[in-house]
Amino acid sequence: GSSLLVEATGVLDLIHLPVGCSITQASLDVVHGGGVVGRLEVGRISLDRGGAVPITIAGPMAVPLGLGPLQALSAAVVQESELELDVAGWVDVHVPLLGHFRQLSLVKRLHLRGAGGLDPLIDSFELQPNQGNATVALSMGVRIRNPSSFQLLSIGVLDFSILTSDGTAFAKVSTVGPVSMRRGVTSLSLTGHLAVPDEESDAFRAVLHDYVSGRSSTGLTAVITAASEPLFDAALSSLRLDTSLPGRPGGAHFFDEIAMSLDVPQALTGLVTSKLVNPWGDAVVHASAACRVSNPFNVSASVQAISIGIVYGGSKVGSVTMPRLDPPLALAAVSRRPSDRAFPIVLRAPATTLNTLLLELLAKGAVTVGLDISLDLRVGVVGRGTGSVMQIAYAEPEVAVRASLGGGETGRAASAASAVAGATSTAVQQGVASPAARLLENRIGSEQGGGDTYSYGGWLG
């Protein structure tokens, strides 16, 4: 067999004694669930005057070759709130004035506290710079709480797998150096890599969604897969601990300062045409947007695909759909820069809805929309074909679109847009056909001085 160092505290119930006495040494078999866990050799223990005596038993415990009882006890210590332990063997007792009494028989049942699952709390979860391979490094900070009667000392390095609610392993980590599970709160530092599954489960996507949205993911499991000390490896391997993953502080944001380019007179005229051609169908307005792109993670990445839904007044009114970015949008670690390309926007909604959106934008200078964003993000080595791809979805519930007509033609452009807006509003709301169209044509010509083209620029903040 082998031996390990143990320490346990409990209460020993004795008869009341006339004088204080003590155990000078003892050899005790530790029994749990009917099986002998090991033999514990202990030194001096004060018994005071008997009664309910708090004791601490510490020392090396010789473990037999059959490790089943040790595994059962370890699981009970870590996972249960209360447990019973029997000790049986001999003790040497010293009684003042009466001397030593050697190898007295002792058989006692101890009622002890367990750790109740250790209550592991993941304090931090961060992707780390690439290490030149296809894996994504990460670091974690974890706090465990051990209120039990036991201390597990010199466990060695512990390996963990972190599982989603459906059992998908998405992180594999190890403690930085050997650890002990002392009583009270212990902070552990862990490093490892993100284990993105080949086929992402719904539960894994939900964890990513919560993380980038700044929300905690519950229902996760940390499984101890190995310990570097062989005895603790046998005792602790496969133990499952319930845990949760905190969301990224403040959430993760990839796009800001989105500049939308749109020819307002043409767009409003298009609304009239759509209303006339298909009074019951959706109108369509095409635009484009440039933006600043950000990478909130401390690891290089590239956006492989984008799908964004645009919400106004509680309804979806448009989208950006790019199922394949070629080339991918490369992002350095923790970076923010202007995008190297514009993104096509399709506004598609009832003509009256789009008309209201554009009129509000012109009248107030700003309008608020929501964005439902889904990205295929390759983290790891930048580029296509290396690293790990994750589908990240999150919502930006309130994004301000601000009107920004600039340049020397600002006044005439705004005047033209206002004139067109008024005519379009009448046509769209009342369904007026050719008179409205002629009015639009005349007003555009007179206000713009012969067909000049004005573009509208807005900022999604």
Image (tube, rainbow, N blue to C red):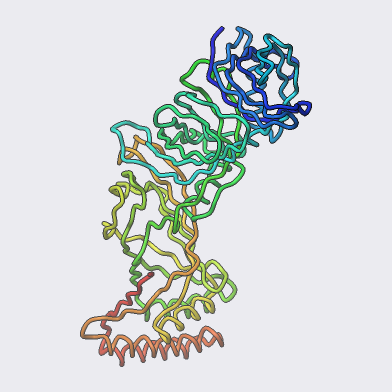
Residue 318 image point, x, y percent = 48, 66
Kindly give the residue lying farthest to the left in the view shown: 408
Q: Count all numbered tags in the image, as a single digit.
A: 0
Q: Picture coordinates of residue 130 (x, y %)?
A: 31, 37
Res 314 → quadrant: bottom right
Name the residue at 45% across, 77% down.
367
Q: Residue furthest right?
A: 15
Q: Would residue 226 appear left or right of 261 to someone viewing this image?
A: right
In this image, 54 relative to 197: left or right?
A: right
- Give the residue at x 29% y 80%: 454
202 or 223, nearer to the observer: 223
Residue 154 or residue 456, whichever sits in front? 154
**Residue lying furthest front in this view?**
97
Which quadrant, please, contains the C terminus?
bottom left
Q: Is residue 52 above or below residue 336?
A: above
Question: Residue 276's x, y, as percent?
Answer: 52, 79
Relative placement, left or right, of 176 versus 411 is right
Residue 148 position (above or below residue 274): above
Q: Is residue 357 above or below residue 151?
A: below
Q: Nearer the viewer, residue 252 or 65?
A: 65
Q: Is residue 429 above or below residue 401?
A: below
